[in-house]
Amino acid sequence: MTFKCYECHPVDGVPGLPEPTVAAAEVIKLGGEVSKRRTYGELVAAIIHPSLARTVTSVVSNGEELEMPNFNKEMTVAQMLDLVAFVHPRYLRLKPLYYDDYYGP
């Protein structure tokens, strides 16, 4: 709760967190079903360098790009690792619509 991530990020499958306080168009959900599950390294990079992870950290609202604040000076390595360990398992990889033998035996 130190960094108030909940102000912009609801976390899929985690009830009881405060509701986001930003406009609905600025809310970026963490976790849920995705076509490609992010690795620990990708999540760490998104936290350390939010501008490099545009698909996760920025959104266009009223023609203006909004970015996640940089917490590098305030967040300890332990806090970052705890955050990644908390968020990572909440991403669920979607199963493809085809089955393993789609292209034949």
Image (spheres, helix red, strand yellow):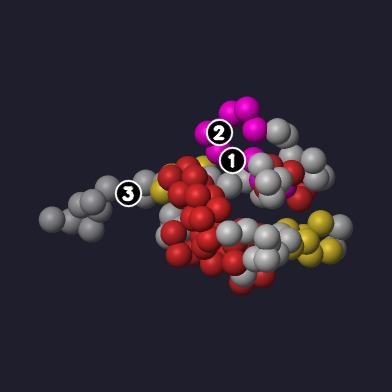
- Looking at the picture, which amino acid does disc 1 mark? Val
Separation of marks 1 and 3 at Cα, in angstroms: 29 Å
Tell me the quarter of the picture where residue 89 sits.
top left
Question: Which type of secondary structure does the marked residue at label 3 adopt?
Answer: loop
**Magenta range:** 8-17
Q: Position of residue 19 (x, y in %)?
A: 72, 34
- Please tell me which of labels 2 and 3 falls first in the chain: 2
Residue 98, disc: 3
- Looking at the picture, which amino acid does disc 3 mark? Tyr
Residue 11, disc: 1
- Please tell me which of labels 1 and 3 falls first in the chain: 1
Can you identify the residue that label 2 sits on? 14
Q: Position of residue 70 (x, y in %)?
A: 70, 64
Question: Which type of secondary structure does the marked residue at label 1 adopt?
Answer: loop
**Label 1–label 2 contact, CB within 8 A:** yes
Nearest the viewer among 77 and 43 is: 77
- Looking at the picture, which amino acid does disc 2 mark? Val
Question: Which type of secondary structure does the marked residue at label 2 adopt?
Answer: loop
Q: Nearer the viewer, mark 2 or mark 3?
A: 2
82 relative to 44, above or below: above
